[in-house]
Amino acid sequence: MNAIEILGLEKTYRVGFWAKRQKRALHPLHLSVEEGEIFGFLGPNGAGKTTTLKLLMGLVFPSAGSARILGRDWTDPEVKAQIGFLPEQPYFYDHLTAHELLNYYAQLSGVPAKERSRRVESTLQRVALANVQGVQLRKFSKGMLQRVGIAQAILHEPKVVFFDEPMSGLDPIGRREVRDLMEQLKHEGKTVFFSTHILSDAEALCDRVAIIHQGELRGIGAVEDLTSSVQGKVEIVWQGTQVPASMKALGADCHVTGDTVRAVIDERQQDAAIDALRRERLRLIALTPMRTSLEAYFVERLQRAETTAGSTV
Amino acid sequence: MNARILHIASNTFREAVRDRVLYNLIAFAVLLSGAAILVGQISIDIEKLVVINLGLTAVSLFGIVIAIFIGIGLVSKEIEKRTLYTVLSRPVRRWEFIVGKYFGLAGTLVVNTFFMAIGVFAALFYVSHKFVRADALVLVALYFIILEFLIICSLALLFSSFSSPLLSAVFAFSLFVIGSFAEDLRGFAAITHGFTRWLVTGAAYLVPNFSAFNIVSSIAHEQPVAMQLVWHNTLYALFYAAMALSGAVLIFEYRNLK
């Protein structure tokens, strides 16, 4: 079952003093996210990621289109009890403590009174903020506020969690912890939809990703599909300081580093290359299919979009 | 009351208290104690009149300033700081948020007025050394001041739902000043003609009639207050606040939180 179905959501703002000019923030967007998936929503700054999330949260109204979350209309208040949301660079009520804030959000989310205190404590422990009792949020660092933001998003044990740039403001350890947390959420059967422009995070975490640029969807698919079989090349590493002539004959692009040689050849030549190394009695260290990185795929999609835009002008 | 509205209201109240809003009570206490001691020394027979006039005017002004300056930020600050995002992404309807904020602010002002009222009565006791039956009229004046606050809160919230804090403050304060002269405006409308009469009469009845709530002078002179006025003012304030609040809800329901 799809946890999220976006059915042509679209947003156009009227801008200018008389609001006569139109600015399209999001072209009709169609995508679906399966239950239990970690889905990355990638794009450069200003691509339309936050607009999409705001549309899904009901913070801005679409110009057209609709969405379904957990099989129900996305504006249904019952649906909102099942989702958690972390906005980009979250900011909270300065004069409350983390415990008070989470207790307030638990009340609004309909967490039963007798469970609230336990839920607040365990969630704060989960985001490594167990020892901040009595400290008002205005004294929190940016990273701590980000953790509070994550805590309020998962506090009521939602089935679908939306994170807008969850790693923003976190140090490397914090980023690692958030990645672990997202994986835990997946193991608990929750669906995680997160936007980011940090591709290494997406590559490490996501089952599938979508790439958005200038308000338009530019690509979508499983991370393995997007990053494999694109190049059709393999990398061969062997011990030695010389490149045999038979390898050169296969058209290998070779580099000698210390006592190892690294060669990149066409995938179809891999058996011939192994045979050549055997004949020369050289020790094979590794043979790895060359995968396009998510970053390379991302850049290629964006460049293609720019070229298309340029050719239509 | 809906539980979510209650939670939003109590959070608004707690924020206001933590934001040291009630510190104005200290300034009020200092002002009133100083005035009571001073008039006790320089005025003969009119100490009570001065204390009632000064005390109730101060209660009203302090409350109006607080109502406007908290009210104008209630919605716009939440949008600006994005605290609203984590509230409205929960099963909270937009109207519940507005109504909860309103009750939170109104509650803050009622508590504030309660403490200031204690100050007024303490100053009265200081200058006259006893309470008389007519002093109970001060409670009616305080009740009218609270009704004024209910209207001002709703107006501040209405302006806050679509404009910046600065503009909201200007609008709300202007309406308070114009509303304080609403009776004069109605009198002026009566002597105009044609389109101007239609226009001025419309404006005179549209602005809140705060002059009907100002009974400080007559209370200071121990003049009784007609029960009819109490009912009239109560219904008027509730109706006006409900209308302004409905306007705020209507605007906010369709607002994009960019």
Image (cartoon, coloured by chain):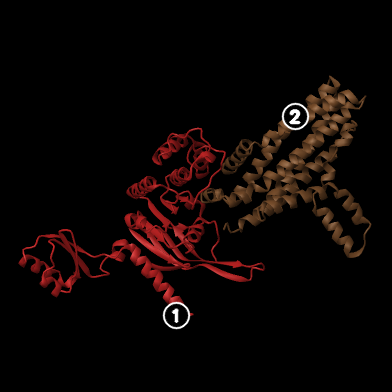
Rendered image: mark on residue A271 = none
For the residues labelled 1 and 2, the Cα–Cα distance comes to: 74 Å
Can residue B31 be seen?
Answer: yes
Q: Is residue B141 left or right of residue A273?
A: right
| Count of numbered badges drawn on the protein | 2
Instruction: Give the x, y percent position of residue B215.
Output: 85, 38
Quarter containing the N terminus of chain B = top right
Quarter containing the C terminus of chain B = bottom right
Residue at 43% in and 65% down? A212
For this rendering, which residue is in front, A160 or A173?
Answer: A173
Q: Is residue B240 left or right of residue A204?
A: right
Q: Which residue is mark 1?
A: A311
Instruction: Give the x, y percent position of residue B206.
Output: 80, 54
A231 lies above or below A34: below
Crowding at dot 2, Cα within 10 Å, few <14 / some 14-19 / many 20+, comes out as: some
Residue at 85% in and 25% down? B133
Instruction: Give the x, y percent position of residue A80.
Output: 49, 51
Q: Is residue A122 left or right of residue B218?
A: left
A107 lies above or below A21: above
State which chain disc 2 sits on.
Answer: B
Rendered image: mark on residue B29 = 2
State which chain disc 1 sits on.
Answer: A
Q: Colour of chain B?
A: brown
Provide the letter of the chain coloured red.
Answer: A
Query: Label 2's element?
Result: helix
B200 lies above or below B103: below
Residue at 54% in and 45% down? A92
Q: Is residue B192 left or right of residue A15?
A: right
For this rendering, which residue is in front, A78 or A13?
Answer: A13
